[in-house]
Image: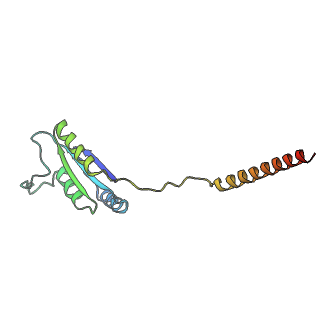
Amino acid sequence: SRAIILISDGAGRISADVQQKVRDWLDRMDIGLYWIVLKQPGGLSIFDETFVPKEDEPLPPVIALHEYFQTLKTSFHAYEADDPDSLAKAIADINQKEKKPIIYLEKIPGKNYTQHCFMLAALMIALLLGVKYLEVRTWHSA
């Protein structure tokens, strides 16, 4: 299967143009998205449903990114990692989910001359057998 694994601290913001490009690309390519947020201990959790931003302030970048990723049509799953063990568990979970084979066709450039070579080889063998047959018949007649 095909997937993108995004590991970030969630501190960045994505412009509207980039959001639309990412949305179009993921829809067209049918790729799953896994987001691992590297969270500081005691920091804001993307899974905290009780969080309410202050009236005058925009959403924190990590919450805004999480909400944006949830609006995508592609499959999306988020993880939080605040230590190496939780990061390893997230990666193991992704590995477990993404074990489907990727089927693709690879076009090899150039032309296939296999049939031509086999025909030439068959003609050469026939010619050699014919010459050998004539050689043996001539020797026995003399």
Quarter of the picture containing the C terminus is top right
| Depth check, front residue: 66 or 127 | 127
Q: Is residue 81 above or below residue 55?
A: above
Is 115 placed left or right of 23 in the picture? right
Which residue lies most toward the right here?
142
Q: Quadrant of residue 54?
A: bottom left
Which residue lies most toward the top here?
84
Where residue 25 appears, as percent x and y from the top left, is: 36, 59
Is 119 placed left or right of 32 in the picture? right
Which residue lies most toward the left here?
50
| Depth check, front residue: 70 or 61 | 70
Mark count: 0
| Depth check, front residue: 73 or 15 | 73
Q: Quadrant of residue 68?
A: bottom left
Q: Is residue 85 above or below residue 64?
A: above
Quarter of the picture containing the N terminus is bottom left
Where residue 112 appears, as percent x and y from the top left, is: 62, 54
Name the residue rendered at 81%, 47% in the picture.
132
Name the residue rendered at 47%, 56% in the picture.
105
**Colour convention of the picture:** rainbow
Where residue 52 appears, as percent x and y from the top left, is: 7, 55
Q: Quadrant of residue 74?
A: bottom left
Where residue 118 appears, as percent x and y from the top left, is: 67, 53
